[in-house]
Structures are given as C-alpha cells and as structure tokens.
Image (cartoon, rainbow, N blue to C red):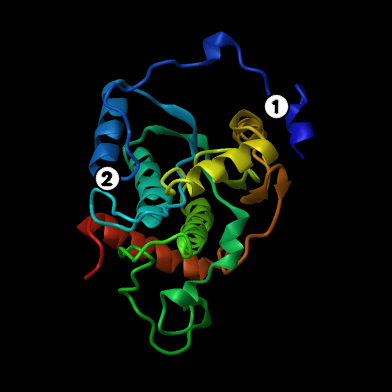
Amino acid sequence: MRACAKDPHAVPQLAPSDIDVRSPSCGLEMGSLASIDRFVDELASQGVLLDGLINNAGMVPISGGVTAEGFEPAFGINYLGTAHLTLELHRRGLLKPDATIVNVTSEEHRLASFASVLDAPLPSTHQGERRHDAHLGALPVDASVFNAMERYAFSKLLLTTFSHELARRVPCTIKDVCPGPVASEIARDAPWPLGDLTLGGMWLTFPSPSDAALPLVERLLADKTAGVHYHMSEVRAAGSHAQDAAVGDWLWKQTAELLRTRQPPA
C-alpha cells in the first residue's frame, strides 16, 4: 500500500508558494493542556488558518508518571491532548471549513474494549444504567512493561471513536489512519536495555518514519473520499464499537467534562 502512496501522481504536488513556514515560538507539549492553549493562542495571534492537520502524538508509556494535569500519559497524550488541540483549533476558527484532519491511530485499537471502564452495558445497547463518571483510562496506574500495550491500545480506541464522532459533528474531512509499523521512539521511556533493544529491532525491521508518513500525507492531500478509518491507504471498518454513534456521543460528553475540569475524575 505504501508503494501507491509513493506514486507522484497519487498525491497532489505542492509548490513552494503553497507552504506556510510560520512556526509558533512557544513550542507544544501534548501532555499539557495549558501548553496546547498557548500554542493555539499563538497561532491565532499570527492569523494562521489551517488547510489540514495531522495529529501524530503517540507513545507507549512504560515507566509511568502523569501528564501536567495528572492524567495517565497514554490517555493524556495519545487521546486527551489530541482531542483538546483539535477542538480548540476548530472552536477558535483556525481550521478552514473544508480542512482535512488526520488522526494517527493504530490497529491495536481492536484489542481494547470500553467494557474495561464501564460497569454497565455499552451506551449503544440502551439497557440498564450506565456510568457517567467512567474514567476512560484517565487515572494514573501502576505502569509496567506488562500493561503498557494495553493502555496504548485503549488510548487508540478512544482516538478512533473520537475521530468518527468528530466526523459527525464538524464540516471538516476526518481521516483516522493507522500508518502500520514504524521505526520510531514510541517506547522511548522503556528502561535500559529494553528501550535500546526495542529501538534497534524496530529500525532493523520496520519502515522509517518518512516512509510511514506517506499514507498520512496521502490522506491529507487526497480528494474528499468516503470512509473515516484507514489502515495505511486502505479504507477499513473500525473495530470495538468505535463507529457506534451512541458510543461516540457518550465519549464526546465524557471528554468535554474532563476538558472542563482539567483533572482526572475522583
């Protein structure tokens, strides 16, 4: 699938005049909602209007810790920070109405389940009482290499569900894309020698970040095609109830409350 993305005729070519090279000086830390606010403020002060956005923040947190606001890092960086940045850009009018938003997800989302944070049936079943204070994986945990991928997968389920709900609520084109395996530093906080061994193995066997980015750029620049979730360049149905409108509406409201309080639920 990457081969077709490399085809020069598959993606529109950009002239230098098409590229806006302005860069905010304040930096951006996706594990800090306040940092995201400052970043958006600076974009607004520069009069930036975005044609497209690629949300590529992602990590597999092994050593634990919390984000600036006290959220579990996979949740806070991979999901909540991404959602906040996207929603703020939209709320502030910094995204063109026909902009394309690409959220970088993972097929690992299929291994996660909302049952892990719900005491009652999923919202889509309309049976019984359901919790409105589900923590969504936001609470800090005893992190280890043994639960790192579980937390990562769940954060990507949240993101993929958010992508589908975002597509129902905003006029922008939304693409939720798994780029496939990538030789990245996604597990950069793994202790020695696990981190070095993982990184070396990934660089020996997986495509480089520049190659893995091709399907993302393709989705960003392609025609406004149908479908939200993609595995590289192939449109697919998402798993684990991520496409369910009732689940998406429930997640949207839970996320809005967390962004309002800016702290994990008690």
Residue at 21% over, 59% down: 261
Quadrant of the image containing the N terminus: top right
Name the secondary structure under disc 2.
helix
Tell me where residue 104 appears, x and y as whole percent: 54, 45
Q: Sort mark 1 into few (<14), some (14-19) or many (20+) by Cα contacts within 10 Å.
A: some
Tell me where residue 247 appears, x and y as whole percent: 48, 69
Is 185 positioned to the left or the right of 42 in the image? right
Tell me where residue 263 appears, x and y as whole percent: 22, 59
Name the secondary structure under disc 1.
loop
First in residue order: circle 1 vs circle 2? 1
Quadrant of the image containing the C terminus: bottom left
The one nearer the camera, 177 or 164, is 177
Is 18 positioned to the left or the right of 44 in the image? right
Q: Is residue 132 above or below residue 52?
A: below
Is 233 positioned to the left or the right of 134 in the image? right
Residue at 39% over, 82% down: 130
Q: Sort mark 2 into few (<14), some (14-19) or many (20+) by Cα contacts within 10 Å.
A: many
Is 3 positioned to the left or the right of 211 in the image? right
Residue beneath label 2, please?
A: 33
Q: Is residue 78 at all visible to an observer of this figure?
A: yes
Q: Which mark is residue 11?
A: 1
Q: Is residue 171 above or below residue 25?
A: below
Q: Amino acid at mark 1?
A: Val
Q: CB atoms at circles 1 and 2 under 8 Å apart?
A: no
Q: Which mark is residue 139?
A: none
